[in-house]
């Protein structure tokens, strides 16, 4: 048995600065480990003797060089050993998520939800790839710094960049938020010229470098047209993988129906938004349910449903801009979370969710080649089917036709 002797100076009686006298004195020989403290009464000469028997020599931690990736940010350039953690904690394989407009208000709510595990689950490590513009680059660094400081265990990588061809590499989710927002008095369609170009470019970049199975949620307005532009520029990615966010409208519709019926909003289901995320959208109260009953049986004021309800939902975003001076951010982020969860969690029996999807051979005879919001169901595998069994009356048909003309 060999002995390792450590001597600590008097000032370090608490052993905080204990010093190894000779490393060659440390040896390993039996199956137990013992520590023996030999202290003289003089605190100046505190000696600690440590005998270690047949303990395996510690394997030096392999600290690899930071990843050779110019765009990784700060602490996220450090190497982590995901495989070891997968073994012990059954964490899933890392997924790559790109967020455009990452320095904006919506992203500021969304990114922390993604990083916390609230969206993809507590066993799903993620990499966030943040896309900004030259103008917003410093702000993007600020966002990444806040992500660093939040110490989220599931957040394994953060990279920032302004080139979609770099940022979108191998991504499995693209949350495309970046766009010029509308101001008071504007319609969303008024943004098409400037935002359309952004989405054409991003479609091309997705086509070139993203995973072939990437799921794309377009948020920047006008989101239906932007989603269409994006998917047309990404012919190697299934058009079915592109969504325009109408979940915010669905959530708004649920809230209004709950308010009118005097119930909490979890009692409202089967709400479809038909059409575009615009003032022509049709929030469908005919098929919607409250406590499992048709809305029209619960809310007898049908005039309210046809006139006020529809208009409130259609114009909610604009009213918010008038009041707040800028467009919705937190509720949009929440609805993006809802939209993602709708695709990765099986839809509850009998219910559905709304999403703007590509109208290729759809059941309802809606013109082909559009991105149009319809009722969808998912098995939770990232894919969806359009719901077959909704009913129409003259009012609903007339409203939907109006979207298309
Ligand atoms: C919303 O609906 O709140 C957003 O699309 C922002 C807007 O322009 O209305």
Image (cartoon, helix red, strand yellow):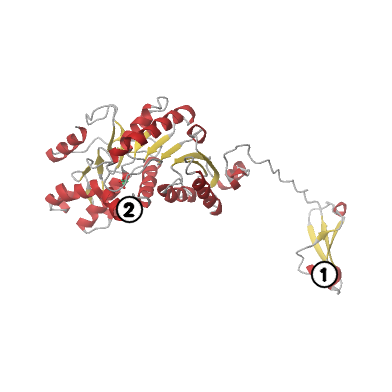
Asked whether residue 220 is in view, the answer is yes
Q: In which quarter of the image is the C terminus?
A: top left
SS at circle 1 = helix
> In this view, which residue lies farthest toward the bottom?
41
In depth, the one of 321 and 231 nearer the eye is 321
* Residue position for label 2: 325
Between 193 and 110, the one nearer to me in the picture: 193
Instruction: Quadrant for residue 182, please give it.
Output: top left
The correct choice, above or below, for 355 with respect to 144 in the image is above
Query: Is 79 displayed left or right of 93 in the figure?
Result: right
Query: Which residue is rendered at x = 34% and y = 43% of the image?
Result: 347
User: Which mark's residue is nearer the viewer, 2 or 1?
Assistant: 2
Q: Position of residue 74 (x, y in %)?
A: 59, 46
In the image, taking residue 181 as reference, residue 52 lies left or right, namely right
Dividing the image into 4 quarters, which one contains the N terminus?
A: bottom right
The dot on residue 343 is: none
Q: Is residue 330 above or below residue 340?
A: below
- 386 and 172: which one is in front? 172
Is the residue marked by circle 2 packed among few (<14), some (14-19), or many (20+) residues within 10 Å?
few
Give the side of residue 349 with respect to residue 301, left or right: right
Position of residue 268 measured from the top left corner of the image (x, y, whole percent): 26, 51
**Number of other residues with Cα within 10 Å of mark 1, as a class: few under 14, some 14 to 19, many 20 or more:** some
Q: Which residue is painted at 24% across and 58% down in the image? A: 263
Residue 60: percent from the left, percent from the top?
74, 46
The residue to which callout 1 is attached is 10
What residue lies at 75% left-to-right and 48% top-to-bottom? 58
Inter-mark Cα distance, 2 to 1: 65 Å
């Amino acid at each position: 048995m060999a002995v390792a002797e450590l001597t600590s100076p008097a000032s370090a009686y608490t052993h905080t600065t204990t010093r190894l006298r000779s490393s060659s004195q440390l040896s390993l020989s039996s199956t137990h480990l013992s520590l023996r403290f030999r202290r003289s009464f003089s605190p100046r000469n505190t000696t600690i003797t440590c005998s270690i028997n047949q303990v395996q020599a510690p394997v030096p931690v392999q600290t690899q060089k930071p990843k050779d990736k110019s765009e990784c940010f700060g602490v996220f350039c450090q190497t982590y050993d995901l495989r070891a953690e997968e073994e012990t904690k059954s964490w899933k394989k890392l997924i790559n998520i790109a967020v455009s407009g990452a320095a904006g208000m919506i992203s500021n709510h969304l990114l922390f939800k993604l990083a916390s595990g609230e969206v993809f689950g507590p066993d799903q490590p993620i990499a966030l790839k943040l896309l900004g513009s030259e103008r917003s680059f410093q702000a993007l660094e600020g966002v990444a710094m806040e992500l660093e400081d939040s110490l989220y265990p599931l957040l394994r990588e953060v990279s920032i960049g302004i080139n979609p061809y770099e940022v979108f590499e191998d991504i499995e989710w693209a949350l495309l938020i970046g766009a010029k927002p509308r101001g008071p008095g504007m319609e969303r369609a008024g943004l098409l010229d400037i935002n359309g170009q952004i989405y054409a470019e991003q479609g091309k970049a997705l086509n070139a470098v993203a995973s072939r199975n990437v799921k794309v949620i377009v948020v920047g307005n006008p989101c239906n047209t932007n989603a269409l532009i994006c998917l047309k520029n990404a012919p190697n990615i299934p058009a079915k993988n592109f969504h325009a966010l109408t979940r915010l409208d669905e959530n708004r519709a649920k809230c209004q129906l709950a308010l009118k019926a005097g119930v909490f909003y979890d009692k409202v289901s089967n709400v479809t938004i038909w059409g575009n995320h615009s003032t022509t959208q049709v929030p469908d109260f005919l098929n919607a349910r409250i406590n499992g009953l048709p809305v029209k049986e619960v809310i007898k004021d049908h005039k309210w449903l046809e006139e006020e309800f529809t208009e409130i939902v259609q114009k909610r975003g604009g009213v918010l801009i008038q009041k707040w001076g800028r467009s919705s951010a937190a509720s949009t982020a929440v609805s993006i979370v809802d939209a993602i969860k709708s695709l990765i969690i099986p839809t509850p029996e009998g219910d559905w969710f709304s999403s703007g999807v590509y109208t290729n051979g759809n059941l309802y005879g809606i013109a082909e080649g559009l991105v149009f919001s319809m009722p969808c169901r998912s098995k939770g595998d990232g894919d969806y089917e359009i719901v077959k069994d909704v009913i129409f009356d003259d009012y609903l048909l007339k409203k939907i036709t109006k979207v298309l003309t």
